[in-house]
Every structure is written in C-alpha cells, then in structure tokens.
C-alpha cells in the first residue's frame, strides 16, 4: 500500500498489519466497522468477533500473554468504550501491553447521542491514550501506540474520530523498533553486602516470582550449590516442579510442611518477586530473616516489604554471579535442603470423596482427579472467587507460562474471555478455565458461544456452589442470613449444550469419571459443572 492513495481507516488497518499482527479481537459498530472490514478483507487479517466489547479487550490481553505479541482489539465509540472499562483496568493491573482501536464520535457533532469524553474515561482506567491527530499522522499514531504499549506495559487506547475515517491519505508504513533494557548484574557495596548475607546464612531459601521465570536453570544451580530449598510465588507456579529441593508455594498457599520449612529459614533470596502481603503471609514469614530482593525493575521493589538488600539486576545473571563468588570464597553448602522430608511437600493432602453433601461432589477430591485427568500440556486460567486458591493448590501446570490468573483487578467474570484469547494465541494446546457460577453468569455465558463459533479447544470447569461464596462465608461468620448471596441458577451444562458445546453435571464420583471421559473424547468446547455445597467449599487461603 506504500504511497498508494487510500482512506484513513484503511491506513490504520494496514498500520496494524505492518506491525506483524494477523489477528484482532473486535465487536463492530458505526465507528470501527470499515476499519475492521479492511483489516480482514484487504489486509489478510483475521478478526475474532466477541459478544461484548469488554470481551475483546480481555481476549487481546490473554493473546498478548500467550504469544508475546501486542494483542489488538477494536470497538466502537461511546458505550463501546465504556463497556471496556473494567477490562482495561484488568490490563493495567496485570501489566498487559495491548492496543484498543476505538472509534470516537465526530468532532463536528458535539450533541451526538454517544458522545463522551473518551480521553477521561481511558485516563480513569489507568490505560494510556493516543489520539489520532490527523489522517496524515494516523499510521505514525498507531506506531506510537504500539511502542508505548511495550514500553509502559499497559493497554493503550488509540482514539479515532469517525469524521476522519474516509479522509484520503497516502499510507506510509511506520514501525518503531523497541529494545528491551539490557540485562545486567549489580555491583558495589550493596551487592557485596548481599553476597555476604547469603554466604553467612545457615538456612537460605530461594524464592522466584514472575520476574524470574526465565531464570530457572540458574536458580536451580544456585540452590544446588547452597543446598537451599526452592519456592515460588503464585505467578511463578510450576517453575521448579519435579526438583527435589522444590517445596512449592511460598506464603498462604503453602502446605503445612512447606510453611514450616519457610519459617525455619534465616535468609530469603527473592528473585523477580514483589514480596506481596499474601506471599509473605502479611510479613509473618519474613520476620527474623535477612531478605535480599533481586528485581530488574526499581518500581517493583519496596511496594509491600522493605528488604535488607536490593539488587536492581537480571535474575539469571545475578544468580550466576552469586554462585561464582560463593565458589571463589569457598563457602560451604548450607545443608538446609538435606533437612527436607523425602516425600514431596509441595502437594496438599488428598480430598476425601466421602466428605460430601448429598447432591454435591467433594471439591478437593474433584480437583485432585481433574489434576490427574486433564490434558498434561494444558494452559490453565482461573477466574475470581472463593474457590480459586484451592484450584491453585491442587491443579498443576507444566510451567509458569502455562498459568494465567484473570482477576488481577479482583473482578470476577473475566475468565472465559481471556481463555478464548489464550486459545487463539496457542491453538495447538488445550485451554482449561476454572470459573465460579457467578463469574460464568457475569461473563462466561456471554462468550462461551464465541469459543464454539471459533472452534477453540476449551475445557471449562464451573465450580457451582449456587452462591457468591466469599460473601456467603462472611455472612455466616457474622451470624447473618446468607440468603442475599445465594442463587438458584439454571443448569450450566444444559446452557453449554444450548450454546453449541458439550456439557456434563457432576454430583458424585461416578459422574465425575463420566465427565473426565467426556473430556477425553470432546469434539469442541466442553463445560463440566461441579455441584458444590456452599457451606463446604474451603475458605480462601489468605
């Protein structure tokens, strides 16, 4: 299209394609219809049509996380954008680089019924705002948005006035190169002090968070040299799976035995972890310990806890450097890992199928069986709700890149949309979503048919306690009537079948086995409804 006379909406569509984007997620309206049409029919792109505008943003965010590309969504003006507010905030909280191409009402029609100050809406969500200034700058404005998304690690909304859409313009490709900051190792007095703390520790423990998931081999080498246990935060889940030093989660998700090991440690070496208040059990697990925090982002340090030493550096290179100096100084291994039990202390005790109410399945038992029977190469997502911590503790993933939590903004009803985005980003892998009954009614039911229409390999587990569980338990704790939190829902399995997928209801171990067999023979999206007693769903591990 270079130097060819075209219209601005075509130039914007081509500008997205110029950035190597072949899939966008969208819902068309007056203000983005022609842009989307040109992307699909003239640029050779694909558009996944969502049922709700917020779904487009969430799908694009999960696509970003799975592929490493900048996900792109498009919606129309006014209510099209306001319907995306919660989804945009989720992307800000989760630090997802993505682009939302949003039409805007004509600047010449201030009394348009869909007119709203879209800049202020976007600003309030915390997302970035990039205005298309003129038809001639449109491709450059899109390129700026892509650059900002990567640099700022958040959604950027490209605002496009509709009265400019059909303006003639000569399209010229514009793509700004983006370079990650080079990895480095810290030096100086703090670096030396940190190594001194590690060298003098009697019971050191290595903790890895999301910022260290690419440093697995280096962290294991350091742990083996120190004879130190290995633990992860939630977003590092599965990083050390199978290693004898692995104790699983660090914090409120820990098993009782792992918690005791953490409590016995005298030095925590935290790589790429925020030291969130749940990770540290509100600081209890760090009391009386030396804490070294290694992170490549200054802004991630000190948000929840002030460590004894901070190294702003690359996780893998810093682990290698620490190991080098330990060898140079001939520091002996601590022997702490030799104190670990012979069995795997990262695994929680098995659930008992006999501990169930009539008409319901024991939740822990069902999760244990699902963990065994679900496809091993799964990508797993969890929506929000009381049930999620038990899922995190009992259902494993191959590695941290295969796990995605969808409630960074603590909003339920966003899981199905992100599961669909993940399934488009990794079409050769099965995607498993755990969601609650409230979350499914809020957003899952809306988009389940999108998974059917687009033929995604999606396994949805609805944890149905017929209640808003977190609120239900609070009412009971205060001796209040919990009826405001309880609901009589329709059959979710039947809804799944009505929407074109497969569905099964589970109330007994035998029905669970039948559902597991159905998963193995599935032909498309399948929904498994676990019927749960709201009074017996485990409390959140917080």
Image (tube, rainbow, N blue to C red):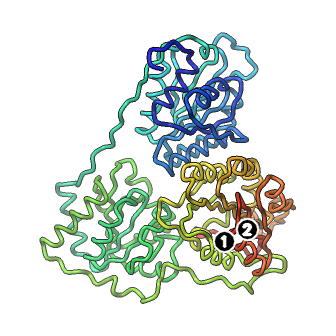
For marks 2 and 1, give the CA distance.
Answer: 8 Å
Is the residue marked by circle 1 packed among few (<14), some (14-19), or many (20+) residues within 10 Å? some
Relative vertical location of residue 370 with respect to residue 440 in this rendering, above or below: below
Residue ID at (51%, 74%): 254
Residue ID at (73%, 14%): 111
Q: Can you identify the residue that label 1 sits on?
A: 539
Residue 532 placed where, x, y %?
77, 72
User: In the rendered image, which quarter is residue 51 located in?
Assistant: top right
Placement of the C terminus among the 4 image quadrants? bottom right
Relative vertical location of residue 158 with respect to residue 349 in this rendering, above or below: above
> Which is nearer the N-term, disc 2 or disc 1?
2
Relative vertical location of residue 112 with respect to residue 88 in this rendering, above or below: above
- Name the one closer to the observer, 406 or 428: 428
Secondary structure at numbered mark 2: helix
Q: Are marks 2 and 1 in contact (CB under 8 Å)?
A: yes
Q: Which residue is outermost to the bottom?
A: 342
Residue ID at (42%, 89%): 342
Q: Can you identify the residue that label 2 sits on?
A: 473
Secondary structure at numbered mark 1: loop
User: In the rendered image, which quarter is residue 377 located in?
Assistant: bottom right
């Amino acid at each position: 299209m270079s130097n060819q006379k075209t219209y601005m909406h075509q130039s914007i569509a081509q500008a997205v394609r110029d950035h190597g984007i072949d899939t966008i997620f969208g819902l068309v309206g007056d203000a983005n219809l022609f842009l989307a049409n040109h992307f699909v029919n003239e640029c050779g792109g694909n558009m996944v049509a969502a049922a709700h505008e917020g779904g487009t943003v969430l799908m694009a965010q999960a696509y970003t996380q799975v592929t490493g590309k900048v996900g792109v969504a498009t919606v129309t003006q006014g209510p099209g954008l306001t319907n995306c507010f919660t989804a945009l905030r989720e992307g800000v909280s989760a630090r997802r680089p993505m682009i939302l191409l949003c039409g805007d009402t004509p600047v010449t029609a201030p009394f348009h019924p869909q007119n709203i100050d879209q800049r202020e809406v976007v600003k309030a969500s915390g997302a970035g705002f990039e205005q298309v200034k003129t038809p001639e700058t449109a491709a450059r404005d899109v390129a700026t948005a892509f650059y900002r998304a990567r640099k700022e690690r958040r959604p950027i909304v490209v605002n496009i006035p509709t009265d400019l859409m059909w303006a003639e313009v000569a399209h010229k490709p514009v793509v700004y190169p983006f370079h990650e900051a080079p990895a480095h190792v810290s030096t100086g007095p703090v670096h030396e002090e940190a190594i001194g703390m590690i060298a003098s520790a009697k019971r050191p423990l290595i903790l890895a968070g999301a910022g260290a998931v690419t440093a697995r081999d280096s962290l294991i080498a350091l742990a083996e040299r120190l004879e130190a246990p290995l633990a992860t935060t939630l977003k590092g889940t599965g990083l050390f799976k199978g290693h004898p030093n692995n104790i699983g989660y660090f914090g409120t998700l820990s098993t009782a035995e792992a918690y005791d090991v953490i409590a016995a440690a005298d030095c925590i070496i935290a790589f790429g972890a925020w030291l969130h208040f749940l990770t540290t059990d509100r600081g209890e697990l760090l009391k009386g310990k030396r804490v070294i925090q290694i992170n490549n982002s200054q802004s991630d340090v000190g948000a929840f806890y002030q460590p004894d030493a901070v190294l702003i550096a690359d996780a893998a290179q810093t682990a290698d450097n620490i190991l080098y100096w330990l060898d140079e100084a001939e520091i002996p291994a601590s022997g702490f890992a030799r104190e670990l039990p012979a069995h795997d202390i990262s695994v929680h005790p098995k659930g008992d199928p006999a501990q169930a109410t009539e008409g319901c399945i024991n939740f822990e038992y069902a999760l244990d069986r699902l963990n065994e029977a679900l496809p091993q190469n799964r990508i797993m997502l969890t929506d929000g709700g009381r049930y999620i911590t038990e899922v995190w503790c009992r259902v494993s993933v191959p590695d941290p890149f295969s796990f995605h939590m969808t409630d960074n903004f603590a909003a339920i009803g966003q899981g199905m949309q992100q599961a669909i985005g993940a399934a488009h980003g990794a079409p050769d892998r099965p995607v498993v979503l755990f969601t609650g009954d409230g979350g499914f009614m809020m957003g899952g039911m809306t988009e389940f048919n999108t998974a059917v229409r687009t033929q995604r390999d999606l396994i949805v587990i609805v944890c149905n306690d017929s209640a808003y569980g977190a609120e239900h338990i609070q009412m009971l704790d205060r001796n209040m009537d919990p009826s405001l939190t309880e609901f009589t829902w329709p059959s979710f399995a039947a809804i799944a079948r009505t929407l074109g997928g497969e569905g099964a209801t589970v109330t007994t171990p035998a029905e669970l086995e039948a559902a597991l067999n159905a998963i193995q023979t599935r032909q498309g999206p399948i929904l498994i409804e676990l019927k749960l007693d709201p009074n017996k769903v485990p409390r959140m591990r917080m």
